[in-house]
Image (tube, rainbow, N blue to C red):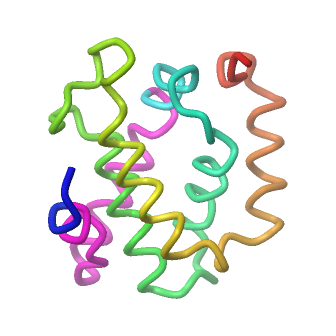
Amino acid sequence: MDDVKIGEILLPGDEAEQERRRDRVQKRFWPVLKRAVRQIPFSRDLIASYYCALDPRTPLRVRGTLLGALAYFVMPIDVVPDFLAVVGFTDDIAVLTAAFAAVRGHVRDDHYVAADKALADEPDLQPTR
């Protein structure tokens, strides 16, 4: 996946676009995460980013960037189809990694606390080590 495509995905978009992305992410995040958790090495960061993206205290541009990356993660149509073993989530990982790098300072401790609680409360989200 090239930088141009990742840059396009991570554009925050206007408020209407962010609203569409937020709705899509809220609806599909948990089911997709349950399917992907064993293939994504940073589930805790991903879940914390989800909470950061939905937090109204998070700056609008940061929320937009995270919602763009999370919307790409939950989209059923992908550059590399997610059902392919091993390589299926590599494009998602690239987009998510770029988003994390861009907004890392905005994911707060309370987002990680919520992520830890979600991981503890849901056995299906436990990554295998």
Q: Which stretch is magenta?
A: 6-31
Residue 110: quadrant of the picture: bottom right
Residue placed at 54% from the left, 75% from the top?
A: 103
Q: Residue extending furthest front?
A: 2
Of residues 125 and 128, the one drawn nearer to the viewer in this rendering: 128
Q: Position of residue 115 (x, y in %)?
A: 74, 47
Give the left or right position of residue 25, taking residue 48 as reference: left
Residue 26 within the segment the image draws in magenta:
yes
Q: Position of residue 14 (x, y in %)?
A: 23, 83
Secondary structure, magenta segment, majority class = helix
Q: Is residue 100 above or below residue 121?
A: below
Q: Is residue 58 above or below residue 45?
A: below
Residue 28: quadrant of the picture: top left
Count of marks placed on residues: 0
Of residues 30 and 62, the one drawn nearer to the viewer in this rendering: 62
Residue 21 within the segment the image draws in magenta:
yes
Q: Position of residue 24 (x, y in %)?
A: 32, 49
Give the left or right position of residue 45, taking residue 64 as reference: right
- Quadrant occupied by the C terminus: top right
Of residues 124 and 26, the one drawn nearer to the viewer in this rendering: 124
Residue placed at 18% from the left, 69% from the top?
A: 8
Q: Residue extending furthest top?
A: 85
Residue placed at 52% from the left, 69% from the top?
A: 101
Q: Is residue 71 above or below residue 56?
A: above
Q: Position of residue 94 (x, y in %)?
A: 37, 49
Give the left or right position of residue 78, taking residue 10 as reference: left
Residue placed at 35% from the left, 42% from the top?
A: 92
